[in-house]
């Protein structure tokens, strides 16, 4: 059994699409799971330079002392450690966003501490940004993740009301924030999807984000979601956004990952396609990984995406190199959905079997 560390609750604003539900990848996963037991044997794992299955852990799910202290205090109604926790991220906007999102997850279960923060420090842009995102999350919980024909009038009204509150709070957060802080704009990206902002309205919002954090990781994911066909764009607009973002980013940014994500939005079987455009996208990500700084916070996620596509393309030695670099970590995109960790284990089994581990 996999040893799983503390799981961080993540709320998604789109209907989840588990890769294991896609026919081609399911066949691959089923075959891989038959071979996964090979890596229960320490000798086989050692032969391939991999961690045995029992040593795997979910990546990015442990909390440091400051995060635990902030969450514990907030759970008891004290908002001050949470405020200090966000402020300590300084101008590392990706880290600040991650900290805000962690607190947003808590606010979805208990927002008494956040309401106290807003009341006692009405000038805090961080509190306003957290409340903006929390209201968007609350709206989506009311609406649910189903298609429109499953949403009752009452659910739709509640959804619209929460998003209207979020828009007002988001505007307040912008007014309160320092001029260089992208946080209040980032908190509105999912709001724009839910409220059906026009393309021009979204472009104006994205311009504010880009001016302050041009390589922001989660901001790019949110924007890519807006531009995909299931929301307010098309395959062409989505790819144009991703290609432009990659072209504007320095080598080693790892934004090349989003080209694989975009193809996954476009094709249900993207990970198993072997056409030249898919191979080129994987090659670009591998080149980006080769020059990224060793401690890049998104390196594990980039390697995880690379593994998924490399195995699908039959590039097993390259996939093995990425698996070795991951060590014991199960990375994104295998953290989303209950099938994710099993898919990762299956891919490892596929690689080992393909390279001779079954003999």
Image (tube, helix red, strand yellow):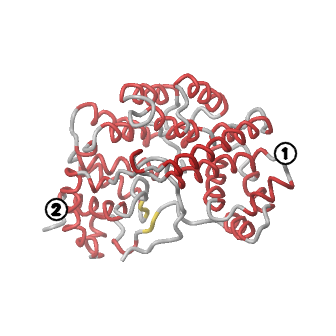
Helix, strand, or loop for circle 1? Answer: loop
Is 132 on the left or on the right of 216, as rendered?
right
Helix, strand, or loop for circle 2? Answer: loop
Q: Which residue is mark 2?
A: 356
| Foreground: disc 2 or disc 1 | 1
Q: Nearer the viewer, residue 307 or 28?
A: 28
Residue 344, image x and y in percent? 33, 60
Q: Is residue 107 above or below residue 172?
A: below
Residue 65, image x and y in percent? 68, 68
Quadrant containing the N terminus is bottom left
Q: Nearer the viewer, residue 135 or 355?
A: 135
Is 263 on the left or on the right of 194, as rendered?
left
- Residue at 43% x, 54% y is 332
Q: Nearer the viewer, residue 348 or 161?
A: 161
Residue 243, image x and y in percent? 43, 27
Quadrant containing the C terminus is bottom left
- Residue at 18% x, 62% y is 31
Q: Is residue 161 above or below residue 213?
A: below
Which mark is first along the chain, 1 or 2?
Answer: 1
Distance from label 2 to label 1 (Cα)? 62 Å
Is 193 on the left or on the right of 309, as rendered?
right
Farthest residue to the right: give it: 120
Label placed on residue 114? none
Residue 122, image x and y in percent? 84, 48
- Residue at 17% x, 57% y is 354
Q: Which residue is mark 1?
A: 123
Farthest residue to the left: give it: 359
Q: Residues within 10 Å of mark 2 (few under 14, many from 20)?
A: few
């Amino acid at each position: 059994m996999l040893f799983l560390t503390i799981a961080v609750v993540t709320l998604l604003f789109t209907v989840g699409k588990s890769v294991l539900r896609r026919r081609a990848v399911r066949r691959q996963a089923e075959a891989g799971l038959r071979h996964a037991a090979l890596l229960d044997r320490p000798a086989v794992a050692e032969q391939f330079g991999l961690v045995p299955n029992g040593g795997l852990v979910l990546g990015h799910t442990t909390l440091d002392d400051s995060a635990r202290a902030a969450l514990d205090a907030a759970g008891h109604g004290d908002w001050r450690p949470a405020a200090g926790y966000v402020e300590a991220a300084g101008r590392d906007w990706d880290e600040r966003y991650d900290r805000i999102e962690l607190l947003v997850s808590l606010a979805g279960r208990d927002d008494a501490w956040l309401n106290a923060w807003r009341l006692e420090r009405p000038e805090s842009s961080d509190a306003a940004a957290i409340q903006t995102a929390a209201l968007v999350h609350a709206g989506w919980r009311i609406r649910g993740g189903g298609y429109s024909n499953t949403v009752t009038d009452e659910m739709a009204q509640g959804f619209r009301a929460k998003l209207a509150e979020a828009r007002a709070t988001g505007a307040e957060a912008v007014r309160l924030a320092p001029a260089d802080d992208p946080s209040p704009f980032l908190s509105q990206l999912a709001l724009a999807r839910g409220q059906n902002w026009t393309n021009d309205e979204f472009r104006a919002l994205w311009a504010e984000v880009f001016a302050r954090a041009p390589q922001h990781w989660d901001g790019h994911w949110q924007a890519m979601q807006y531009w995909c066909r299931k929301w307010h764009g098309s395959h062409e607009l989505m790819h144009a956004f991703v290609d432009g973002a990659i072209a504007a980013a320095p080598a080693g940014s790892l934004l090349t990952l989003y080209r694989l994500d975009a193809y996954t939005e476009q094709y249900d079987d993207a990970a198993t396609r072997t056409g030249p455009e898919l191979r080129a996208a994987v090659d670009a990500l591998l080149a980006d990984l080769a020059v990224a700084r060793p401690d890049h916070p998104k390196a594990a996620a980039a390697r995880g995406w690379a593994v998924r596509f490399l195995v699908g393309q039959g590039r097993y030695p390259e996939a093995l190199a990425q698996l070795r670099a991951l060590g014991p970590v199960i990375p994104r995109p295998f953290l989303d959905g209950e099938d994710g960790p099993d898919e990762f284990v299956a891919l490892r089994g596929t690689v080992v079997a393909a390279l001779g581990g079954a003999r």
